[in-house]
Image: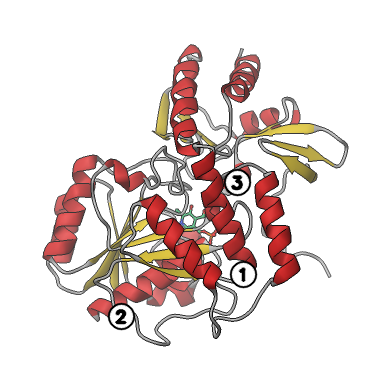
Amino acid sequence: MNLFNVYPLYNVTPVKAQDCFVWDDKGRKYLDLYGGHGVISVGHTHPDYVAKLKKQLDNLGFYSNAIQNPIQVELAKKLGEISGYPNYDLFLCNSGAEANENALKLASFHTGNSRVISFHNSFHGRTSAAVAVTDNEKINAPINKQQVATFLPLNDIDAVEKELQKGDVCSVIIEGIQGVGGLDEGTPEFFKSLETLCEKYSVILILDEIQSGYGRTGKFFAHQYYDITPDIITVAKGMGNGFPIGGVLISPKLEASFGLLGTTFGGNHLACAAAISVLEIIEKEQLMANALDVSAYFNEQIKSIPQIKKSKGKGLMCGIEFDFEVGELRKKLIYDHHIFTGGAMNKNLLRILPPLTVKKEHIDTFINALKEILK
Ligand SMILES: Cc1ncc(COP(=O)(O)O)c(C=O)c1O
């Protein structure tokens, strides 16, 4: 059997990793400034994380959601405290798309409506409702097009109000900072007005923090730069540092009932152990402060590269924009300088999503490589 050929692959075969580095099958060492699409939060194979997962596997790897699971309760308590949402409830699932799928369902159950407002260039995942609210025709199959989604320009609050006035909208979904699209974001005023309008029209505001959350921007969530309180927040990626887990943080105004949502694997013992370990390490190693410190250094250093036309993002969710497509540049970074970086829908943008443990010396390595390639 062959693999279903949907991924264009770089010719690199990682076989081991530690903190911000990955080694391939030929023993070559790579600096990982992309964390496998922003997934590696506390560094590859962090010793505390590995120890916690091994211990959990020795005890109990999985049982279903039909039994008491104190590890889920511990995770919810810890996540509530560290994120600043102690009074929200947590629903656990396995991926980002699933988190958004469940968030959209909850909004629809709650309001009785089905239309969703989303934004140009957004990405929310590939399952049915999540992909329907993703602004990319190519990945929406005919079956997904039954969902009604309206895409509006980011930061056009009048357009949002005009749609909400129609009375058939269940939710507005927006990324804290757009990831796949290319690091564009709402202005503080836009986020604030979205919150006000959603409240006014009784529509659920969903903040997709799947890429921008978990401390990456220097605050636990990117929206916390704007003093707003969304009704639902979705998380995944950095939550498990590579162990698949996603979550939906739900305001007390949305009521749970037995059977409303459910999953076989979501919130399993191993996934929860991974997620608790991630939160412990973020706290113990003060990784949000590190994100701010290293990103300030990064933003200072990139000023020495005149070919960079614009820098985008916050903290360690960084984008640097050129006036040419970066495909070849990324190849040179990987093959000649052994540095992983990411691309975006915006072909001129290089995406940097390193582990939150990244150090200034790693930024120096990257800047020197960029200068060498661009000279
Ligand atoms: C903002 C955002 N939402 C949702 C998703 C989907 O997550 P997953 O690939 O885990 O389903 C992604 C993945 O890149 C994302 O960046």
Q: CA distance from mark 3 to mark 2?
A: 34 Å
Q: Position of residue 22 (x, y in %)?
A: 74, 38
The label on residue 269 is 1
The label on residue 40 is 3
Disc 1 is placed on an element classified as helix
Q: Quadrant of residue 285?
A: top right
* Residue type pointed to by label 1: His
Q: Which residue appears farthest toward the right when viewing the image?
A: 26
The label on residue 363 is none
Task: Say which residue appears at 64% left-offset and 66% top-offset.
Answer: 270
Does label 3 or label 2 sit earlier along the sequence?
Answer: 3
- Evaluate whether residue 262 shows in this view: yes
Q: Position of residue 134 (x, y in %)?
A: 42, 60
Comparing 336 with 192, the one in front is 192
Q: Position of residue 170 (x, y in %)?
A: 25, 72
Residue 329 vs residue 297: left or right? right
* Residue type pointed to by label 3: Ile
Q: Which residue is mark 2?
A: 109
Does label 3 or label 1 sit earlier along the sequence?
Answer: 3
**Label 2 with label 1: CB-CB less than 8 Å:** no
- Please identify the quadrant where the C terminus is shown: top right
**Label 3 with label 1: CB-CB less than 8 Å:** no
Q: CA distance from mark 2 to mark 1?
A: 29 Å
Give the number of the mark in front: 2 or 1.
1
Q: Residues within 10 Å of mark 2 (few under 14, many from 20)?
A: some
Q: Residues within 10 Å of mark 1 (few under 14, many from 20)?
A: many
* Residue type pointed to by label 2: Phe
Q: Quadrant of residue 367?
A: top right
Q: Residues within 10 Å of mark 3 (few under 14, many from 20)?
A: many
